[in-house]
Amino acid sequence: MFNLRVYGILINSERQVLVSDELIRGSYITKFPGGGLEFGEGTRDCLRREFLEEMNLKVEIGEHIYTTDYFQISAFNPEHQIISIYYFAKALEPIKAPLRNIPFDFDEKQLKVYEEKRETETFRFINWDNFSAESVTLPIDKIVATMVKEKLNHHP
């Protein structure tokens, strides 16, 4: 079974990278915002929907960065192969979702969601100088973090 995921790399005007800190079934994961492709939607539409659902944020989807080109098993379902697609994303409006300064700083409401759904998330920006593959948890995200860092260090 294939699991198609679409993620956005959003870098603000202060050169900070947006990440999602998530608690999923007891695992703490820092990843890029995005999620699963639904039947009948394109990858760019999926990413726009995910930003709207997760952050109530309208975004413009930019340049394609990377699509997984090797076998990666899902961290959550050993019967699924993950294929992830990454794009640059640009906020079309100010971010209204609460932003945190420390990883996994969930508020009471988010912890209540976790009790019900066994997953919750919060968002924060990482300063460019502190951003690297070590900033994110998932193997494909680490590859993309390195690619983005190299690309933008050479072509800001």
Image (spheres, rainbow, N blue to C red):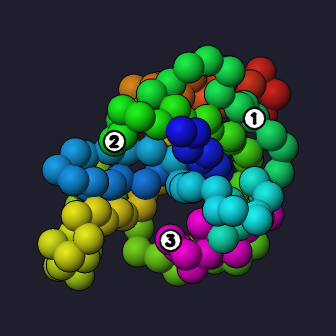
Whole-Å distance between the Cαs marked 1 and 3?
21 Å
- Residue 5, position in %: x, y? 59, 47
Q: Earlier in the sequence, mark 3 or mark 2?
A: 3
Residue 49: x and y in percent read 66, 70
Residue type at mark 3? Glu
- What residue sits right under mark 3 in the picture? 54
Q: Amino acid at mark 2?
A: Phe
Q: Residue at x 84, y 43 (%)?
A: 63
Q: Which residues are magenta?
A: 50-60
Where does the image place residue 102, in percent across and percent down from the top left?
27, 54
Q: Is residue 127 left or right of residue 59?
A: left
Crowdedness of circle 1 by 10 Å Cα count: few (<14), some, many (20+)? some
Earlier in the chain: of badge 2 and badge 1, it is 1
Tag 2: Cα neighbours inside 10 Å, few (<14), some, or many (≥20)?
Answer: few
Does the stretch in magenta take in 106? Answer: no
Image height check: is 147 above or below 81? Answer: above
Q: Which mark is residue 76?
A: 2
Based on the displayed image, in which of its 4 quarters is residue 155 positioned? top right
Residue 44 relative to residue 78: left or right: right
Q: Earlier in the sequence, mark 1 or mark 3?
A: 3
Q: Secondary structure at mark 3?
A: helix
Q: Which residue is mark 1?
A: 65
CB within 8 Å, label 1 to label 3: no
Callout 2–callout 1 Cβ contact below 8 Å:
no
